[in-house]
Amino acid sequence: MRAAALLLLLAAAPAAAQTAWITNQSDGTVSVLDTARQAVVATLPAGSRPAGVAAAADGRHAFVTSPDDRRVYRIGASGGTALDRAVGDSPLGIDVDPSGGRVYVADWYGRRLFVLDPDSLGTLAVVPVGATPAGVTVAARRGLVLVAQRDEDSVALVDAAANRVAASVAVGAHPFGIGVDPAEALAYVANVMSDDVSVIDLDTRREVARVPVGRTPYAVAVTADGRRAFVTNQHDGTVSVIDTARRAVTATIPVGEYPEGIAVHPDGRRVFVANWFSNEVCVIDADGLQVTARIPTGDGSRAFGRFIAPR
C-alpha cells in the first residue's frame, strides 16, 4: 500500500478524539469510526488480512499489523501519509507508547518483540520473547511492555529502557489479550483455553488471582476508574464484566458472533466491541450494561488491540 492509494479515502475521516480503528481481516480494510456519530466514515485498504491495531495517542493515525503480508501499516485519519514496512515473520499484537516514541509489535512465529520508530517504522530494537507472542500492552509509567506468550502460558514483562525481558509471569492456558488498569498496578490477561482471566500484580510481578469468565476469552479492556474490566468471550458471543475489587464476574452481556477486540471509550460511558463473525461493532452502555447500537463494518472485524486512543 502506498500514500496515493489512500488520500482520497482519508479526506472523509473524523477528528482525532472521536476515531476508532477497526481491522476487517477478511476484506483487507480498516473501518474508521466516528464514535460520536457511531458510524463508519471511511474504509481504508490495509494489506492482506489485517488483524492487530493500535491507535496513536493523538488519535490522528493508527498502526495496523498484517500477519499474511508480514507488514506493519501506518495510516492517517486526515490525509496524512500512509507508510508500511516489513516486520518479522508474522506481526500480530501491537501497541504504542503514549508518549509517541515507540511502537511495539509481537512477531507470532518469530518469538520476537519488534520496537519500531513511529514515524519511519524503522526497527529500533528486537527483543527475544517466548513462543507465539500475541497481545502487547504498554505500561508506560512502569517502563514495561507486557507480551502474552501464548504457547508458554505466561506473560513477558519487557523492560522498555533496556529492551530485554525482566520477568516472565505464569498465567492460565494460552494467554492472548492483555488489559492494564490506569494506575498500572494490575494487568488482566485473557486465557483462551482455560476460560479465565489472570490478574497480575505489577509490583510483585506475580499472578494474584484467576477469574472464571465465558468460553474462549480473547481481549480485555479496563475502565478509566479501574473498577471494572470487560472481557470478550468468543465462543459464547458475550462480554463478561469483572468487578475488579471483588475479582468476580457481575454481569454477562450478549453481543454478537465471535467478539474479539474491545475498548472502553475515553468518555467512560461506552464500550466498543468488534464482532468478528457478525461484521460489526456493537456499543455497550457502560452503566446499563446492554448493547445500545450496532455499527456495520467490514468482513471479519477483529480490531485486536487498543483501537481507540486512551485520551
Image (tube, rainbow, N blue to C red):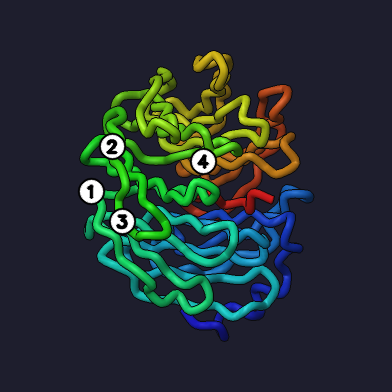
Residue of label 3: 164
Task: Tell me if mark 2 has few (under 14), some (14-19) or many (20+) residues whose alpha carbon lies within 10 angstroms of its own.
Answer: many
Residue type beneath disc 2: Ser
Whether residues under marks 1 and 2 lie with C-beta atoms below 8 angstroms apart, the answer is: yes
Residue visible at 37% across and 56% down? 92
In this view, 131 is above or below 273: below
The residue tagged with tag 4: helix, strand or loop? Answer: strand
Residue of label 4: 275
Residue visible at 36% across and 45% down? 157
Residue of label 1: 130
Whether residues under marks 3 and 4 lie with C-beta atoms below 8 angstroms apart, the answer is: no
Task: Tell me if mark 1 has few (under 14), some (14-19) or many (20+) residues whose alpha carbon lies within 10 angstroms of its own.
Answer: many
> Toward which corner of the image does residue 251 lie, by quadrant?
top right
Q: Which mark is residue 154?
A: 2
Instruction: Give the x, y percent position of residue 55.
Output: 58, 58
Residue type beneath disc 1: Gly
